[in-house]
Amino acid sequence: MLDVGGRQARRRRRTVRTVEAAVAMPVLLALLLLGALLFDVITDTLSWQVLAPAGSGRSFAFAEGFAPFGSWDRVMRLELAARGVPAEDIEPLLADPEERRVLEARNRVELMPWVDGRPFRWLVTTVSDELVADRPLWSGLASRRELLAAAEPGQVVVLNAWLDPAFVLRNASRSPLVAGLLPAFVGSLLLVGLVILLAVPIGVGTAVYLEEYASDTRLARLIELNLSNLAGVPSVVYGILGLTVFVRLMRLGPVVLAGALTLTLLVVPVVVVAAREAIRSVPPSLRQAAYGLGATRSQVVLRVVLPNAVAGITTGVVLAIARTIGETAPLLVLGAAAFVPRPPDGLLSTFTAIPIQIYSWVSENDVEFTHAASAAIVVLLAVLAVLYGIAYYLRRRFASR
Amino acid sequence: MRLRAGARARERLFGGALLALACLSVLTTAGVVAVLVFEATTFFSDPLVSLREFFTGRQWTPLFADQRFGILPLLTGTMMVTGIALVVGVPLGLMSAVYLSEFATARRRRRVTFVLELLAGVPTVVLGYFALLFVTPLLQRFVPGLDLFNPLSAGLVMGFMILPTVSSISTDAMQAVPVALRQAAYGMGATQVQLIWRVVLPASLSGIVASVILAFSRAVGETMIVTLAAGQRPLFTLDPRETIATMTSFIVQAASGDQPAGSLAARSLYAVAATLFAITLALNLVSQIVVRRFRERYE
């Protein structure tokens, strides 16, 4: 007998509420994990350090060193003077491109949030600086006075901000202090460019063929079967395919082109799925109208279907870009993990990419390289956030049509 | 349709070009199979390697002077990490799916799906970083004897990586349960909990199983989390606190090493990759069969 308003009903409602709370828990756990990840990565980009500087060890006030777009030069001049370089030699040193390149490779000009108790000072750190201690943000915050007291003369206590604007513009280096993300950033950009160039025609072409030309033939089903199987293949296996075919068989070597070709193969199924959905959502009446006006199949595709499917196809392209930027395993297997100090200067040069750089920095068992890795992760996540944001926006606009 | 000769030729050319592009996927699959089969057979035809030792041997040391080629350590490593990942990811994923399809309002559903998509979008190298540098130190406080590289941390984080997969496919399966079935249950006096437990879950079982198998396949093939957090030391053990190697972490190790290209050590990479490919292919096929076979019963 159903007891509608009484004790049984109340117990049942309580059970339902408990069950609802229980099944909602994983989502909260996922949020917690994402939050912990973000928090951990961001706080790791700041560290308290005690350095024994090889340069002058002097820090300069913010106003002393700041110049819009010219801070590096201004601070470098102050630093060279402080190191004892005679005044008349400083300008020629900075003007000579060779000397300047060496200076840029060895020295890092940075606005540190805190130097020896004073906020926002310019400091020049070099590859030869000796690291005496490195503390994470929170524990260092608590013990910064002790750090200051324990520092020997000549040593500098700083709050090092590893993710500064120049991080993305510096070259990689064997010294974590001056390591930058430029080669990896340019490498990723090159890869993305090439992959779009290759994967979009292939992916859209395949989608058009499957939807417009051969919808129910055995060939189409074979192609569809292949696509769905390829989507389930681990990305390392693509890397092995690329290693064997592009790097070894075609003698390309571990270069940008080989990486781009491999990633194209990986990413084509993503484009195909999105393009098919977009093409399918074009109303048949548009097609019929075009055929009725005497258009050929290619004209219908090129002038009616594709222009109307652009939003969905672009979403697929953006997702493909996100995948390209985030994939590590295939490139690692191809051989992109070697130390690459400079950005690639062409399609046939060795390269690195942002996730590869993160991997190799984390693999160095060095606490300072971990900070650099965290900074790189923040850059990577920021780029992905922008991309996913664009895809999300496109999907909503596309859906409302 | 009557076309001028020139236009007809152009049409056929266009269609042919599209066909060529479309066949690239077939070519890719053929390429993968060809490369793996060829290199693996070359590997197994070497006198130092025996098929029996490969599948039953407990030592995997192709990169050492004394070369042994038993793949069991890599298999146990992979299965340990994958097992932990499934134990974490499947229940959590199913619970999310139940919440999304049975309890959440439309607005809540959009927000929760957004969070899950965020989770799915984190690059695996970042998850590996998190496992090594955050989860492992945290766990080392509670688990005695936990190595720096261990399958436990990797498995835990990987569980969250597969959670969105399990959740989204299971949610689709649950939402596809016919309304008539639900209303019949309510009509017979079922409570919401009874509805979920006795009607929705059994009805969407094929989709749920498919999602689990797919998640299994993804976990087996996952590389970066295990390379960074589980280790690269092949060891035949079932203790999740010890450093091990998985099939994928060995592939990375062998590929980044300096083995001369034709050597047996380098070829062992292909044998492992072939095994990995076979496993994931089998899992994907099984998942497709499960969906097709069981779906008929409830419609």
Image (tube, rainbow, N blue to C red):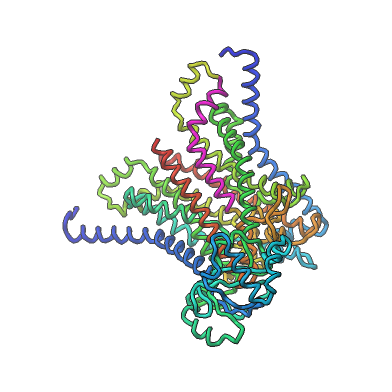
Q: Main secondary structure of the magenta part?
A: helix
Q: Quadrant of the C terminus of chain A?
A: top left
User: What residue sits 50% from the left and 41% below the top?
Assistant: B292
Residue A226 percent coordinates (x, y): 61, 39
Instruction: Evaluate whether residue B47 shows in this view.
Output: yes
- Residue plotted at (53% across, 77% down): A115
* Residue B206 visible to the viewer: no
Q: Position of residue B139 (x, y in %)?
A: 51, 73
Asked where in the image residue A49 lies, by quadrant, the reply is bottom right
Count every numbered label the image shows and give the total: 0
Q: Quadrant of residue A60?
A: bottom right
Image position of B54 (left or right of A284): right
Give the x, y percent position of residue B138: 50, 73
Residue extending furthest toward the right: B47
Instruction: Tell me what residue is drawn at x 40 percent, y 58 percent.
Output: A27
Query: How far across and how far down the image is residue A227, in percent?
Result: 59, 40
| Foreground pick, B206 / A320 | A320
Q: Which residues are magenta?
A: A296-325
Seen as rendered, the residue at the extreme left is A5
Asked whether residue A302 is drawn in magenta, I would say yes
Examine the structure image and report whether residue A324 is included in the region drawn in magenta.
yes
Residue in front for this viewpoint, A222 or A267: A267
Q: Residue at x 38, y 61 (%)?
A: A25
